[in-house]
Image: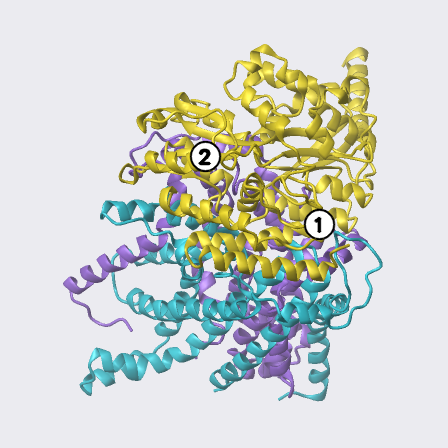
Amino acid sequence: MARESTPQRKIVVTVIAWIIALAIFFPILWTILTSFKTEAQAIAIPPRFLNFDWTLANYVTVQERSNYFGHFMNSVIISLGSTILALAVAIPAAWSMAFVPGKRTKDVLMWMLSTKMMPAVGVLIPIYLLFRDWGLLDTRAGLIIVLMLMNLPIVVWMLYTYFKEIPGEILEAARMDGASLGKEILYVLTPMAVPGIASTLLLNIILAWNEAFWTLNLTTSNAAPLSTFIASYSSPEGLFYAKLSAASTLAIAPILILGWFSQKQLVRGLTFGAVK
Amino acid sequence: MATQASRAAGRLMISPAVILLFLWMIVPLGMTIYFSFLRYNLLIPGDNPLVGFENYQFFFTDPNFWPALINTLVLVLGVLLITTIGGILLALLLDQPMFGQGIVRVLVIAPFFVMPTVSALVWKNMFMNPVNGLFGWLATVFGLQPFDFLAQAPLFSIILIVAWQWLPFATLILLTALQSLDSEQLEAAEMDGAGPVSRFFHIMLPHLARAATVVILIQTIFLLSIFAEILVTTNGGPGNASTNLTYLVYSQSLLQYDVGLGSAGGVIAVILANIVAIFLMRMIGKNLET
Amino acid sequence: MSKTLRGVLGASCLVALGLPAMAETITVATVNNGDMIRMQGLMSHFNEKHPDIEVNWVTLEENVLRQRVTTDIATNGGQYDVLTIGNYEVPIWAGQGWLLPLDDMGEDYDAEDLLTPVAAALTVDGTLYAAPFYAESAMLMYRTDLLEKAGLTMPENPDWDFITEAAEKMTDKANGTYGICLRGKAGWGENMAFLTAMSHSMGARWFDMDWKPQFDSPEWKATLDTYLNLMTNYGPPGASSNGFNENLALFQTGKCGMWIDATVAASFVSNPEDSVVAENVGFAPFPTAAGGDNHGNWLWSWNLAIPASSTKQEASKAFVAWATSKEYTNLVAQEDGIANAPPGTRTSLYENEEYMKAPFAQPTLTAIENANTQNPSVQDVPYTGGQWISIPEFQAIGTAVGQVFSAALAGSSDADQALTAAQALTQREMQRAGYPK
């Protein structure tokens, strides 16, 4: 609803928007700034905003103590793996729900979403026992499976709402032309659904990256992603704000950067059918 | 349009997702239900005898049970309220022409990307800590006593932290919906002499209702099982002031390694979550149907 | 390419291929405390000695660590070869047959050298089940300059009345100085460690000989009243979220007049690199009741233990023996200075003159030697343990009671309400657990 706007109005809006945006962003900014301080300066009163001795010492310490790259790779593999697997299962399901809905489609969808409400803490011990027996403890494969199942309902739903917006006539036309079901999905549906799939993919990567219960409890070292990396900095003895900030910055930076660069794609499909 | 063949194909295609989710639900749930009837403590190995409903009875009579239930609702509703209203206001603001809109948007959505553990740690230590935190310092600058957020208003503080994380999500969805609003409709209303307030309430708000429902549904799913933020900041306290149902189950099962009791709590939590789910689905279903 | 060169290359290829196959990787779960982090930095020395053992560290925050290793050992998950556990867990787990006996640690190990109270807490039926890495009791740390300014002198054995008086006189809220900092954060290893020890020093007990909770006793009432009085009037704001680490940071930045906590803190607060008050720190024993001589009997040690189910027992044992040996103490002395040696486990360390020059060495030793975990209270008790109760249920009960007392500190209930609630919930949990057994 871009309408004409006076320059004064635009300036006022700009100022207000920037103040609010900076306030929302401030905790992240503060964390990043703190990560470059010494421990003493990190808790100095009054707080130091830019007037401190910038140091990389905290990052060096963190790097010495932890295998950041190993955790980072695990996070990448686990979040990507679980996302791709979830998409592979969810795309056909969402297609079927959107284009050949049955009487029970809505119920199935709602049931799927309700599985997400199961509190993970209540089923940790059963899952732990199963994982032990199947040799999945501390494996990336195990985590990929769990996170895929965790996020599958959201993925199905997001895709379903997106697919539903695609006019059925186009598929009809393709079918008339003799396209098989596989071809229909591959050549007609997929290109139209790319924005939806892309944003589902991104959202799911973010959710998987930030998951901190299963990843912490089902891994030891080989498959441990960044959530366990944070757990070793959360409350050690002595002053720790600066080191915690450095570790936090390292843990959130990759996903923050990905999120920023892909925010257009993320937003485009993030409607859940809310936009008609 | 669906033919017999495509119906069959549709079933086939939906089945992997359904089967997987069914297994994911039924296997742990089945084990949990079974465990919930056992006396089963990890620290006391033995033959785990069947004890009927003893675990359920113990869980229901836990003095923390009702407060936890209420806290869960307060937490969910509080965050929903802040994020929905805040999200609408922010969406209205971001929809206006301004300088540096792209950067503003990037800054606003950033909290959504932050790991919940990290954001809880940062808020707890660097902001809400009354001695070393920024809020405490701000208070002293204005000559006030530092407010001890996590002790004096634990649930409110957690609501604040969680709302900060989810505000961007709500804003994004609402903003997308707002941008899809037909500008002709608005202009027509303007011509008819409708003021900005009346335009907001009569045209924009109804249009946003759908998006708001989606925001509420998705957030509720995640908010019902909030755990990391509580574990990191208050451990459910002081007392039981910030214990929600998930945290109660955690403290019963993992803190005391009482699998039987924890399982009973887990089953109860699943049932309650599903009641909320059914309730929500009804509401959402209506709103999303058209 | 010459033949020799080729030969050398070939040989080195063989070595490169051969080594990983021979090397055994052990996974060590540990807590993110300073002494453990230091050990991780010294691993090259271990690798020199044992090139065939590769150590994989899993460093976690204390609560996460405890939950992970307990789940794993109780379900026989087999994820860890060496566990870092407290002396609370050791006797319980050893009783379940979960831990490997450590009575043959090699000739150099010298188990006789371990401090008696520390070793006793890790021994079940005459067998050592875990090797202590460092141990601590609790004591009073105070600011000598502030005490002097307050016109007081520290008695040899301060009692709680003196503490109250000193706290009052040292408090200067306008300048951000609080008379006393104590643990307030809920948890059996946080505020309840302190309060349990304090209650023992005041003659209270958790249970009578029939395992009936005793929170309705006058001794507990006195304990909680004294504690709440100290903390609400002379403590820092936000005390109900302060644990060991938070108080350490407060003391190091000069915000506390007194702090009663683990002896291991002594080396941190008197280290000028981390502490602005390093020059002015004094030490005194854990306070007693007026006229009493019970110092609370706090005794904690972080220990290395090996799950009985570990498939790499020899390699794990070699590591545990190295990490808790005299040799390791010497190594730390060489690399970082003797004052940084892991404290509280070996007599030999306290016979080292260089080490005894540190102001905290003697008070630490005295505190540890005086800790009587077998009879912690003046009253008869059915349990052992100074700042914890040696039953598996204590983690849960201690944490729940800790929540109640933490709420009282935050001001949402008073002492009587808190004690009544603690009594009720402890009774409930004990009944469920089937006590008296």
Where does the C terminus of chain C fall, quadrant-wise?
A: bottom right
Q: Position of residue A77 (x, y in %)?
A: 63, 49
Residue C94 vertical position relative to residue B102 in the rendered view, above or below: above
Q: Colour of chain B?
A: cyan
- On the question of residue A207 being in view, the answer is no
In this orientation, which residue lies closer to the viewer: B9 or C369?
C369
**Colour treatment of the image:** by chain
| Residue type marked 2 | Trp
Which residue is under mark 1? C209
In the picture of the structure, the residue carrying the numbered disc 2 is C259
Tell me the residue at 71%/23% (across/down).
Answer: C114
Give the position of the N terminus of chain C as an image quadrant. Answer: top right
Q: Which chain is yellow?
A: C
Label 1 amino acid? Answer: Met
Q: Indicate the chain on which mark 1 is placed.
A: C
The chain letter of the purple chain reads A
Toward the front, the furthest residue is: C291
